[in-house]
Amino acid sequence: MLKKISVTLVAIAMVTAMAVPAFAADFTSSVTGKSAPEIVTTTNSSGETVAAIIYDANGKETASIPVGSLTVTPVSEAKTANASVSKQLTAAYEQLQTTSLDSIAPALTDAVKTYSPQMTVEDLVVRDLFDVSLDDSAKEQLAKNGNAIKIQFALNLPSDALLLVLHNTEGTTWELIADNKVVRNSDGSVTVEFDSLSPIAFLTDGGSLATDPNAPTSPQTGYSETMLWGAVGVGALALAALVLVIRKRATD
């Protein structure tokens, strides 16, 4: 009888431990209800106001993206976007909900240490998740070998606040945009250089992130802390019960 009870309790504890998930990405409370970061227009070499500029491998301006030819779609509007954008954004969101950030982009581990030796990837939150797409003409320009596009986003983040940029290059593959391609501007905006466009995530430090009390809220994403500690608690109770049974049997 004791053997059967012990086996049962150990099985419960093991199943419970397996149910405790790896830490998936945390999102700001409003990420599924907020609009996309606003694009800050820039001026090309001809003095025209444009949405973005494409450069060749030598940094020479090769094409300008007119305002209206660049579309930014936040994850909050994924359901109403065209089929391709909707599919990519939805898949990106689901992956971030269920997979740890350091698994998605291992380079994040060193990136956060550079910002603060005490910081870990678990301290990061997804501030924004959105897709950027171009019209066909602009796509052709960007697709040319060595070309890259620079886009300026209005974020209103202090220049000393942590900001890391993830780019969903294809399928479930993400890249961390290098520091030298993420330029923080004095007005709180950021200029990011991409060699292709698809879903993008802005990550920041969850501990220092300013919250907007008027921002729309969204359902809790990923696994809640309550669920985590609940699972741990059940496992601990199962193990404690096993110990008590064994002790009682030993004294009988």
Image (tube, helix red, strand yellow):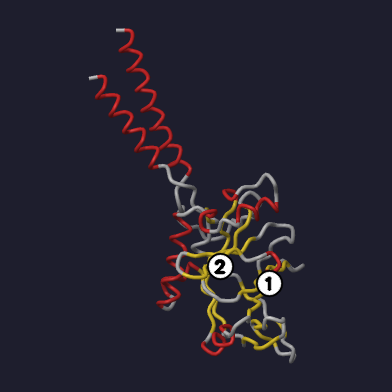
Q: Using the image, determine if residue 208 lies above or below residue 140.
A: above
Q: Using the image, determine if residue 175 lies above or below residue 82.
A: above
The residue labelled by disc 2 is: 167
Residue toward you, 207 or 171: 171
At label 2, which amino acid type do we have? His
Which quarter of the rendered picture does the C terminus lie within? top left
For the residues labelled 1 and 2, the Cα–Cα distance comes to 14 Å
Residue toward you, 218 or 229: 229
In the picture as drawn, the residue positioned furthest to the bottom comes out as 46
**Looking at the rendering, which quadrant does residue 177 occupy?**
bottom right
Q: Position of residue 49 (x, y in %)?
A: 69, 87
| Element type where label 1 sits in the image | strand
The residue labelled by disc 1 is: 191
Is 108 left, or right, of 21 in this rendering?
Answer: right
Residue at image point 77% right, 67% down: 186
On residue 200, the disc is: none
Say which of marks 1 and 2 sits in front. 2
Residue at image point 43% right, 46% down: 21
Q: Position of residue 251 (x, y in %)?
A: 33, 8
Q: Position of residue 36 (x, y in %)?
A: 56, 70
At label 1, which amino acid type do we have? Thr
Which quarter of the rendered picture does the N terminus lie within? top left
In the picture as drawn, the residue positioned furthest to the left comes out as 1
| Element type where label 2 sits in the image | strand
